[in-house]
């Protein structure tokens, strides 16, 4: 959801992992030869590490995936469908008629979008302070 909120970061990595390439692993702190499987394994390590921090899974992925892969390589069109459903329910009041699993997905998206709002606000405040400091000097 962070990519929908802030846009996809630019990376030198392919949108589709069709070949092996080398990049720095943010979790192993060494250069790794990435294949589709290794990209998935790296994502799992990031998710597991994020569970012990204050950041959300989405924030951890948004901040770390560009170091070793193109986020578009991990994107599924179904994420757009989920985001559209979340938007219809939360912004436009469409009645939710799904099951418990779908409700959990929407709750997860809601938490991630709330975290995006908070991050965006913190970034705006920080940028305003920096501009004020520069203007005073």
Image (spheres, grey):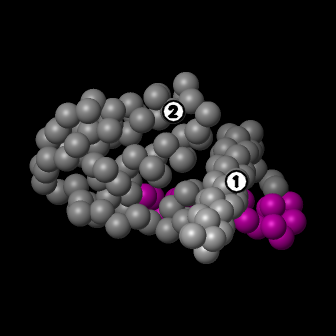
Q: Local crowd at mark 2 within 10 Å, few (<14), some, or many (≥20)?
A: some
Q: Residue at x 22, y 43 (%)?
A: 24
* Disc nearer the start of the sequence (1/2): 2
Q: Local crowd at mark 1 within 10 Å, few (<14), some, or many (≥20)?
A: few
Most extreme residue toward the bottom is 135
Q: CA distance from mark 1 to mark 2?
A: 17 Å
Q: Would you name the residue on which mark 1 appears? A: 118
Q: Residue at x 13, y 50 (%)?
A: 21
Q: Magenta residues, as a range?
A: 75-95
Residue 2 location, x and y as percent?
55, 57
Q: Residue at x 63, y 59 (%)?
A: 126
Q: Nearer the viewer, mark 1 or mark 2?
A: 1
Residue 107 location, x and y as percent?
73, 45
Q: Residue at x 28, y 43 (%)?
A: 39
Q: Nearer the viewer, residue 90 or 12?
A: 12
Instruction: Kindly state the secondary structure of the residue where label 2 is placed.
Output: helix
- Which circle marks residue 50 in the picture? 2
Q: Quadrant of residue 88?
A: bottom right
Q: Is residue 127 visible?
A: no
Give the left or right position of residue 55, taking residue 25 as reference. right
Query: Which quadrant is the C terminus positioned in?
Result: bottom right
């Amino acid at each position: 959801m962070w990519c929908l909120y802030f846009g996809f970061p630019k990376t030198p990595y392919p949108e589709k992992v069709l070949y092996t390439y080398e990049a720095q692993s943010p979790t192993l702190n060494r250069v790794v030869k990435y294949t589709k499987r290794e990209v998935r394994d790296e994502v799992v390590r990031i998710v597991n590490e994020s569970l012990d921090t204050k950041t959300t899974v989405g924030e951890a992925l948004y901040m770390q995936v560009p170091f070793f892969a193109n986020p578009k390589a991990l994107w599924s069109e179904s994420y757009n469908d989920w985001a559209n459903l979340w938007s219809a329910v939360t912004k436009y009041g469409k009645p939710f008629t799904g099951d418990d699993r779908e409700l959990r997905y929407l709750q997860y998206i809601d938490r991630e979008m709330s975290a995006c709002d908070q991050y965006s606000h913190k970034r705006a405040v920080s940028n305003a302070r920096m501009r004020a400091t520069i203007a005073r000097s």
